[in-house]
Image: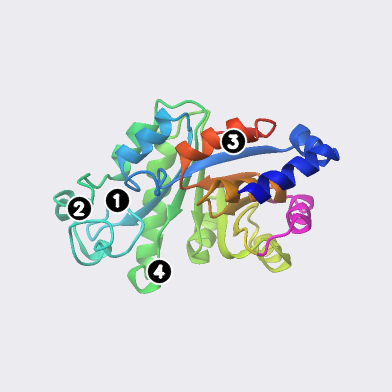
Amino acid sequence: MKKIILAFALLWAFGAADAVAQTQQIRCFSHRGGRMEHDENTLEAFQASLDAGYHGFEVDLRMTADGEFVVTHDSTLERTTNGKGVVEKTTAAELRKLRTKKGNKLIFLDELLAFLKPIKGLYVEFEMKTSPVDLYPEERLKEYCDKLYAAVMAARPDDAEYVFTSSDYRGLRYMQQIHPKADLLMISSKPCNDETIDLALSLGIKRIGCTMDGTSRAAVKKAHDKGLTVSLWPGYTPNDFMLGAYLGADFMCTDIPVQLKKFQQENAPWLKVTY
């Protein structure tokens, strides 16, 4: 952390940080509601992030055996809940009986959308969790995309920025073809580089979410020059945020929303950050 802060101090002294501060805008959003501070993907987590001043969120969505959307990351239940088995092979009624390891109930898309609706200036990434692929063959994938798009867009506030994200390019392509108004982001486990930039351009997607590991400032600039918006991850520590800011990210997630906001305001107040 001290090295990152020192680097920014040196940049500031030579004028580079001042130039960044005057031009760069970063939107920071709470990843799963801040999974390292709160019970991930629960209303408790999203409320805590909202209370901390965040109007930006990332959520994960899986489709139950009977076609409802539950907010959860894994395809299996064991890591986060007191249940067992596969989410996609479990009914919504069965899931509603479960509790997270911290005692919270699982929430469903309609509950999440109701929570979000009164919030002004929202930025929300709805991650389409459609893997493993065998759980979402073609027809089920289409059902997933159609239902999700209809539900999310029907509840979207006028001033909200709602983005559908995925690392499963099948879903992104289908959304492009059938729901061309959908705002899409391609998630990659690779850095922002020539490969990920070219892939996004070939898919016709204007947003990319890449890992900071291996990303260079020059690559982010190239992505910007090509008309792409760059979101970087992970967001485990304040160091991650400071590095992402230096690299030129437009958007960054954080798993520590409360800690990060306090850190940024105390140590890097020159950065223009929207939470």
Camera-near label (3 vs 2) is: 3
Question: Can you tell which of label 4 and label 3 is closer to the viewer?
Answer: 3
Residue 270's image quarter? Answer: top right
Q: Pointer 4: what residue?
A: 138
Question: Distance between the Cα atoms at labels 4 and 2?
Answer: 22 Å
State the image coordinates of residue 188 (x, y, percent, origin top left): 57, 63
Q: Does 215 lie within the magenta span? A: yes
Query: Can residue 208 be spotted in the picture?
Result: yes
Instruction: Indicate which disc residue 70 carries.
Output: 1
Q: Measuring 79% from the left and 51% from the top, which residue is drawn there?
A: 225
User: N-terminal of the two: label 1 or label 4?
Assistant: 1
Q: Give neighbour class at mark 1: few <14, some 14-19, many 20+ (Cα, 10 Å).
A: many
Of pointers 1 and 2, the one earlier in the residue sequence: 1
Q: Nearer the viewer, residue 166 or 25?
A: 25
Decide: marks 1, 2 in contact (CB < 8 A)?
yes
The structure residue drawn at horizontal position 65% and vertical position 61%, both measured from the top left corner, is: 200
Three-letter amino acid code of the residue under disc 2: Ala
Q: Amino acid at mark 4?
A: Glu
Give, as a single range, the part of the protein colored magenta. Answer: 214-228
Numbered circles on residues, count: 4
Of marks 4 and 2, the one in the foreground:
2
Prevalent SS, magenta region: helix
Q: Earlier in the sequence, mark 3 or mark 2?
A: 2
Q: In terms of secondary structure, where does tag 1 sit?
A: strand
For the C terminus, the quadrant is: top right
Tag nearer the camera, 3 or 1: 3
Q: Position of residue 88 (x, y in %)?
A: 27, 63
**Amino acid type indicated by mark 3:** Gln
* Distance from Cα at disc 3 to Cα at disc 2: 40 Å
User: In the structure shown, which secondary structural element does the residue marked by tag 4 occupy?
Assistant: helix
Q: Are marks 1 and 4 in contact (CB under 8 Å)?
A: no
Residue 89's disc number: none
